[in-house]
Image (tube, grey):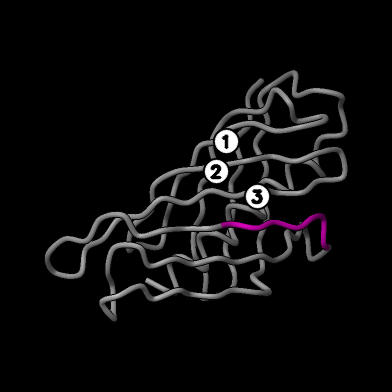
């Protein structure tokens, strides 16, 4: 769970940040697809009682978004385990933001114990005030993710 939550949060936030870097217009006026990586720099896991995977476990993290190796923004995310099933299966809810040069982008969605996640873009501020779409996160390691950000006006 720790690896999935940390990587997921980082990747999501980073993807949002890259969107800001790639789009300098006042508003999003046409569909856009962007590709980048995120790197987790800070993270903490809260293991709620009982010990081990259980309801209420949390992962909070932050880091940087990179495009072609260059830092283009920052992000933060928080995920909470809200369902635990048999065989170690679990589900959780994540939300976060990406701070961009021209504003913020926010996201939220469900996650589980796999290496690929899709989240909804829930809004933004500044140049991204009309942002919506989705983010697909593929975990590459415990601290690095590949992001595909698809924005629509």
Residue extending furthest toward the bottom: 51
Q: Nearer the viewer, mark 1 or mark 2?
A: 1
Quarter of the image for residue 105 reads top right
Q: Tell me if label 1 and label 2 are in contact, CB under 8 Å.
A: yes
Q: Residue at x 69, y 56 (%)?
A: 75
Q: Residue furthest front?
A: 49
Label 2 crowding class (10 Å Cα cut-off): few <14, some 14-19, many 20+? Answer: many
Residue 3: say if magenta.
Answer: no
In this view, the residue in front, 34 or 74, is 74
**Residue 68: quarter of image:** bottom right
Q: Is residue 45 left or right of residue 112?
A: right
Q: Mark 1: few, some, or many residues within 10 Å (few <14, many ≥20)?
A: many
Residue with the mark numbered 2: 135
- SS under mark 2: strand
Compare residues 70 and 52 and report the one nearer the observer: 52
Mark 3: secondary structure: helix
What range is drawn magenta here? Answer: 71-77
35 left or right of 121? right
Q: Which residue is mark 1?
A: 121
Q: CA distance from mark 1 to mark 2?
A: 7 Å
Q: Which mark is residue 15?
A: 3
Disc 1 on helix, strand or loop? strand
Instruction: Please give left or right for residue 32 compared with residue 117 in the image.
Output: right
Q: Are marks 3 and 2 in contact (CB under 8 Å)?
A: yes
Which badge, 3 or 2, comes first in the chain's sequence? 3
In which image quadrant can residue 1 be found? bottom left
Q: Position of residue 116 (x, y in %)?
A: 42, 56
On the image, the x and y values in percent for residue 102 come to 86, 38
Does 98 sit above or below residue 88?
above
């Amino acid at each position: 769970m720790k690896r999935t939550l940390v990587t997921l949060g980082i990747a999501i936030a980073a993807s949002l940040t890259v969107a800001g870097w790639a789009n300098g217009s006042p508003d999003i006026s046409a569909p856009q697809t962007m590709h980048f990586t995120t790197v987790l720099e800070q993270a903490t896991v809260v293991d709620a009682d009982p010990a081990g995977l259980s309801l209420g476990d949390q992962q909070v993290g932050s880091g940087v978004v990179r495009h072609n190796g260059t830092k283009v923004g920052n992000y933060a995310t928080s995920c909470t385990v809200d369902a635990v099933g048999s065989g170690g299966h679990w589900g959780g809810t994540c939300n976060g933001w990406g701070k961009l040069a021209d504003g913020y982008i926010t996201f939220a969605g469900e996650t589980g114990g796999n290496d690929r996640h899709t989240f909804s873009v829930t809004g933004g501020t500044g140049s991204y005030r009309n942002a919506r779409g989705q983010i697909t996160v593929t975990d590459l390691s415990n601290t690095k993710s590949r992001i595909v950000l698809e924005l629509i006006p």
